[in-house]
Amino acid sequence: MSAPVTAGTAASPPNPAPPRPLNVAAERARTPGSFTGHHFNSAGAALLANGTVEAVIDHLRAESLSGGYEAAKHAAPALEAVYARTAELLGARLEEVALVESATAGWQRAVSALRLRPGDRVLAARSSYVSSALHLLSVERDHGVQVELLPNGPDGAVDLEALEAALRAGPAALVTAAHVPTSSGLVEPAAAIGALAGAHGVPYLLDATQSLGQLPVDMGAIGCDLLIGTGRKFLRGPRGTGLLAVRRPLLDRLTPEAPDVRGARWTAERSWELVPDAKRFELWEAAHALRLGLGAALTDLSALGVDTVARHLAALAAALRERLSALPGVHITDPPAAGGAIVTFVVDGLDASDVQRQLTYRRVHLIAVPAGHGRWDMDHRGLTKVVRASVHVYNDEDDLDALVEAVREIVCLRGRATASAMGRRDSGVEATAPETDPATATPSPAATDPIPALTPYAPRPNSRCHDAIVVGLGVHGSAALRHLAARGLDVLGLEQYGLHHDLGSSHGATRMIRRAYPHPDWDALVDTAYRAWAELEGASKAQLLDITGGLYAAPKDRPDPLRGPGCREVDTEEAARIFPGLRLPTGFTAVHDPRAGIIDAQETLRAQLTLAERSGAHLHDQAPVLDWEPDGDEVVVRTGKAVLRTRRLVLCTGPWTAAQVPSLAQHLTVTRIVNAYFAADPAGPLGPSGLGSFSVDLPQGLLYGFPAADGRGLKAGLDSGPPWDPQAPRPEATADELALLAEAVAQVLPGAGPVTESLTCLYTMTADRRFIVGEVPGAPQVLVASACSGHGFKFGPAIGEALADLVCGIARPDLDFLSPARLFLGGTP
């Protein structure tokens, strides 16, 4: 039987105020991670709020400037405030609270200080966490302590009658339970356990690791003498933080086994004394920055109110539990006494880790909990592994929809796969044995990790099959590689030349970003691109965009004028006020885009490849792909050195796309483009103060460029050039080409000096100047992203994410207007 846990003992006011609603939008706004997917792993490590991150970084910066000791002295009042916030949260006294490195560190110091002796009885709930259980079993083996497991009642919680009988049976040294276990949404009757332990004078240790931050926890109301917790879960603090609270009079009787200079004073050559408060359990060496982050998180929780948070989480979890239980083949594994924020379940016929992986492909993030993390609980219930979802203040109904629909899709795909396998058996086709690693003779990851939306994978013996291979590591390929690796896929990136080479379309220092487009079809993708750039900047900790504003000019009678969200038309006079360095010809008009700017192209490629490798992607340069061919549900890829297999092939091969996909050749034109730098004073009208990104549709062609901002001068180019064979040598710009470009520059940028340097690149164009993004016709295992027609770099991070979605079987109808199929079906742009 279980009972609700209350926050205190004060009487309710006669007319209590109505419950405060939680502002989820506000919580999401200060939680950047909430925009990178649907996060359901607060029971593992919750997403940090901006203020928490800033508190940590600010102190680290202070340490870098003044030194660790000096920074700690300066932060002493803020560090003391963390103790006050912790005591307030727990309903404890300030001197009863210690800050430690983790819940496990707190547990071990507290239990060791009890100095358990042979024959001492420890009454432990089955909800106990693995680290606590392992410590108790070690003490039992090494010191003769008797660990007695308390049985559960019909509701899955500690059987209170059995606990009382155990307490009456003889003296006990300790009662311990996890308020909420790691393996389910159970909420133990913590206060009822405390009342029984208190009545028999037995110390009561409550593991509040999974309850702090999601349930009210008041040590006085619960009746526990010792309490441990961690910062990284529902408290939303940084990893590496924890807390230990010990109430008096028990505190005065506990002596740590290994006192530290933080918790004891060395009073004479052979004598020492403990400090009088709970700091006796602390160590001198501590991560002050992390503790200040914990303090920021506790301040946030106090401002929201634990009761407000608890109501929100309980309602979300109850709705999730109900919706998942309605899906065929899905079984909730929470016991009847469940509540709070955690929901656990299993899917028929699928290992929980496979479910976790397939959900990750769909940007739904949670975790699989094995029995080894809670044997006393899970073994007893016949469970080997469960999927665990846990909600928090940044989750809403949209997140629930994403999780439930993703699980529904996985269940449906599982049913289809089962039917397909039965069909093969019925037709007499012999099933292929699971792939094994010859070194270990165990199933390989490729054999147990099917990608959604494909029929079951039947690999050849002893052959590795990647989840995805990305060919071409320019801006779109590196973005796809990064997003695929971040979803946990086994992904390989192949580049035919060296990384960051200058033979294709992604090299050079700068690119333009803008919202101004002639057709509203682009508006949604433009918005997605800006969000993707913000996410990439956050992940890479680098500034990749410089928002300068932009002017895009053309004759007034242009049939397809630019327009876009937030853009407006301006005349030549207003254009001159916006960009004094630009002089438009008579009869021209311009579109002003205040959100346009300049992309750091080199840093973008470096950031995406670094993040891809950090997430586990493998990169091979100097690895040209000679050919590829579908083979059932897979693709065989041949390079000069190897024959590779993959479930999905992603071609981001730019000017070489026609060679990789011959059926597209007639629809693609590769063009050689010339860019040049012109001498200009960065402090003058052609610098950032007088110019931003721009384009002007002139008789010489579409002139585009950027201000003199990087020490190399004004950069400009003409958006046209001769057709070019990408395999042919590419000479430097000719004198005639540079003269034509200089003529165009002089017409609208009168302050520009002579050419100081030049470079060339290749555009791959379609007739409608729209990209090609989607499945290769006739080869659904192969995706292509190319023909970006000179304006694709700005969409790089967004296209990479879209390709990762398509690899994982997630439809992207927003990209239908870029589908390769339009070229074969006579579709109109």
Image (cartoon, rainbow, N blue to C red):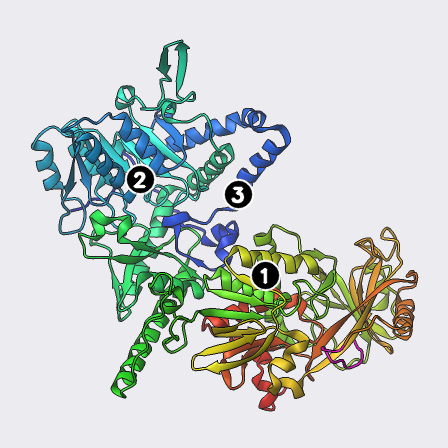
The vertical placement of 23 against 274, above or below, is below
Which corner quadrant holds the C terminus?
A: bottom right
378 or 615: nearer the eye? 615
Q: CA distance from mark 2 to mark 1?
A: 38 Å
| Amino acid beneath label 1 | Arg
Of 351 and 592, nearer the camera is 351
Q: Secondary structure at mark 1?
A: helix
Taking the view exactly as shown, the residue that stands out farthest to the bottom is: 826
Q: Is residue 440 left or right of residue 177?
A: right
Nearer to the camera, 37 or 25: 37
Mark 2 neighbour density, 10 Å: few (under 14) some (14–19) many (20 or more): many
Q: Which residue is mark 1?
A: 531
Label 3 packing within 10 angstroms: few (<14), some (14-19), many (20+)? some
Q: Is residue 91 visible?
A: yes
Q: Secondary structure at mark 3?
A: helix
Say if mark 2 contacts mark 3, CB within 8 Å: no
In terms of sequence position, does the residue under pointer 2 or pointer 1 come before the other? Answer: 2
Q: Is residue 825 above or below residue 753?
A: below
Provide the secondary structure element on which disc 2 rests.
loop
Q: Residue at x 83, y 55 (%)?
A: 687
Identify the mark at residue 208; answer none if there is no mark: 2
Q: Which quadrant of the view contains residue 744?
A: bottom right
- Bounds of the magenta span? 718-728
Disc 3 target residue: 53
Which percent across, then down, holds residue 592? 75, 65
Q: Point out the tag, 2 or 3, that comes first from the N-terminus.
A: 3
What x and y, as percent, mark residue 514? Answer: 70, 66
